[in-house]
Image (tube, helix red, strand yellow):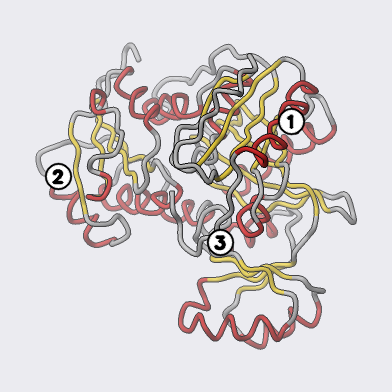
């Protein structure tokens, strides 16, 4: 970025992702450091774009990370700290606070990692959220069970995606689950389960302005796919539709309510099947997983990782300019596969813009100016994938990628 002195960017990654963020930082003339775990030392990082790599046994020990990065900073000036995964958001905020580096601090980071904090804040700012209770005080939990009809969903406050979520149908099911959690009960939230269609808005925010937002609809809810098995799908909603306009506005409200200043966000809403209303479910200050970056790029040409890098480097020192982009349609299809290396050579439609290369997985991103072509191909590919590749595993209690 012409006119700006070179910046040193410290990227934190507890999982292998964000390669395009790293490449864009280097393209912009930055020095790039990567802090990751020793288990990921030999992962497929873009090493040609990384100036130095640092390893630590794990990235969850706050004291160890602070001491390690502080030691690193004795001989290196760090201008930005960026988390490449949802699990790194709070640690990055901790480092910014400790080293006094600009960017999202610990208080704001809680709104984008803690499902209880974001629900309380959203509700207090007038957003519609499902009824919920902190699983802290048993009397209050009991009152919630009496007043809010089942089923309910027990959620870890700081996990990502559908990890660790359990659906509960009766009070007799809930109390043993809480008892088994022991001293970890306060790290959970209990929420009314609302059946309906789930949407996600993937946005770019620069200096509190939502400058780009794409609205998508999941096929099956991610929790259903994770717990019951199935093919994961998501696609661009019909442009100009009521759903798109409503969700763009709601996403803008969420970003304002939670104090998001700059970066990328992934926010989920549910449209209640019984009342047709949109409820805020959760948000995250990062690029969405499940190849959503390829989904957005297929429809618009905008790479969320690259644009996030530009915004982090600028930090309001110069105005951010969104690149020209299309307004086409795209979809993603992903499934577990019983083959270690699935052969997808029989899938040759010209709309395919990305093929997933991952052991025991099969997946595609497809793009077209025609939304009905995307819908047709998703339905057709789901049918074929079930016949050719589909496999099912028990839902994870811990993150796996």
Looking at the image, do the residues carrying marks 3 and 2 touch, with CB atoms under 8 Å apart? no
- Local SS, label 2: helix
Residue 90 drawn at (x, y percent): 40, 54
Inter-mark Cα distance, 1 to 2: 52 Å
- Quadrant of the frame with the N terminus: top left
Looking at the image, do the residues carrying marks 1 and 3 touch, with CB atoms under 8 Å apart? no
Closer to us: 62 or 120: 62
Q: Which residue is mark 2?
A: 72
Using the image, determine if residue 398 lies above or below residue 392. below
Indicate left or right for 372 with 36 as reference: right
Inter-mark Cα distance, 3 to 2: 41 Å
- Local SS, label 1: helix
Residue 341 drawn at (x, y percent): 45, 36
Q: Which residue is mark 3?
A: 394
Find the residue positioned furthest to the right.
275
Neighbour tally class for label 3: few under 14, some 14-19, many 20 plus, Cα within 10 Å: few
Which one is earlier in the sequence, the residue at label 1 or at label 3?
Answer: 1
Using the image, determine if residue 220 lies above or below residue 372. below
Instruction: Say which residue appears at 60% left-offset and 85% top-offset.
Output: 176
Instruction: Say which residue appears at 58% left-offset and 56% top-offset.
Output: 162
Looking at the image, do the residues carrying marks 1 and 2 touch, with CB atoms under 8 Å apart? no
Can you tell which mark lies on residue 96?
Answer: none
- Local SS, label 3: loop
Can you tell which mark lies on residue 380?
Answer: 1
């Amino acid at each position: 970025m012409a006119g700006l002195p070179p910046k040193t960017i410290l990227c934190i990654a507890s999982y292998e992702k964000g390669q395009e963020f790293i490449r864009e930082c280097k393209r912009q003339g930055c020095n790039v450091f990567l802090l990751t775990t020793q288990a990921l030392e030999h992962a497929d990082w873009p090493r040609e774009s990384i100036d130095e790599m640092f390893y630590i046994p794990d990235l969850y020990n706050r004291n160890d990370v602070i001491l390690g990065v502080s030691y690193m900073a004795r001989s290196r000036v760090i201008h930005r700290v960026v988390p490449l995964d949802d699990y790194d958001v709070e640690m990055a905020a901790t480092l910014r606070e400790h080293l006094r580096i600009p960017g999202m601090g610990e208080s704001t980071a809680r709104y984008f990692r803690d499902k209880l904090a974001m629900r309380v804040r959203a509700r207090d700012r007038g957003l519609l959220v499902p009824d919920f209770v902190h699983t802290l005080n048993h009397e209050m939990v009991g009152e919630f069970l009496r007043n809010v009809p089942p089923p309910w969903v027990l959620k870890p406050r700081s996990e990502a995606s559908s990890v660790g979520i359990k659906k509960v149908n009766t009070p007799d099911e809930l109390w043993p689950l809480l008892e088994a959690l022991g001293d970890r009960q306060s790290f959970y939230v209990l929420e009314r389960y609302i059946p309906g269609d789930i949407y996600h808005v993937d946005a770019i925010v620069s200096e509190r302005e939502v400058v780009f937002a794409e609205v998508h609809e999941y096929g099956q809810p991610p929790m259903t796919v994770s717990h019951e098995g199935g093919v994961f799908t998501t696609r661009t909603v019909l442009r100009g539709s009521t759903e798109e306009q409503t969700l763009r506005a709601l996403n803008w409200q969420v970003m304002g309510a939670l104090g998001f200043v700059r970066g990328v966000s992934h926010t989920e809403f549910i449209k209640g099947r019984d009342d047709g209303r949109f409820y805020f479910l959760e948000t995250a200050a990062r690029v969405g997983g499940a190849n959503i970056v390829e989904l957005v790029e297929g429809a618009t040409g905008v790479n969320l990782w690259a644009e996030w890098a530009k915004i982090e480097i600028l930090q309001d020192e110069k105005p951010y300019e969104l690149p020209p982009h299309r307004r086409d349609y795209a979809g993603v299809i992903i499934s577990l596969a019983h083959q270690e290396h699935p052969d997808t050579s029989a899938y040759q439609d010209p709309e395919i813009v990305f093929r997933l290369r991952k052991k025991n997985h099969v997946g595609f991103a497809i793009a077209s100016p025609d939304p009905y072509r995307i819908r047709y191909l998703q339905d057709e590919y789901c049918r074929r994938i079930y016949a050719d590749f589909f496999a099912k595993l028990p839902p994870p209690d811990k993150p796996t990628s």
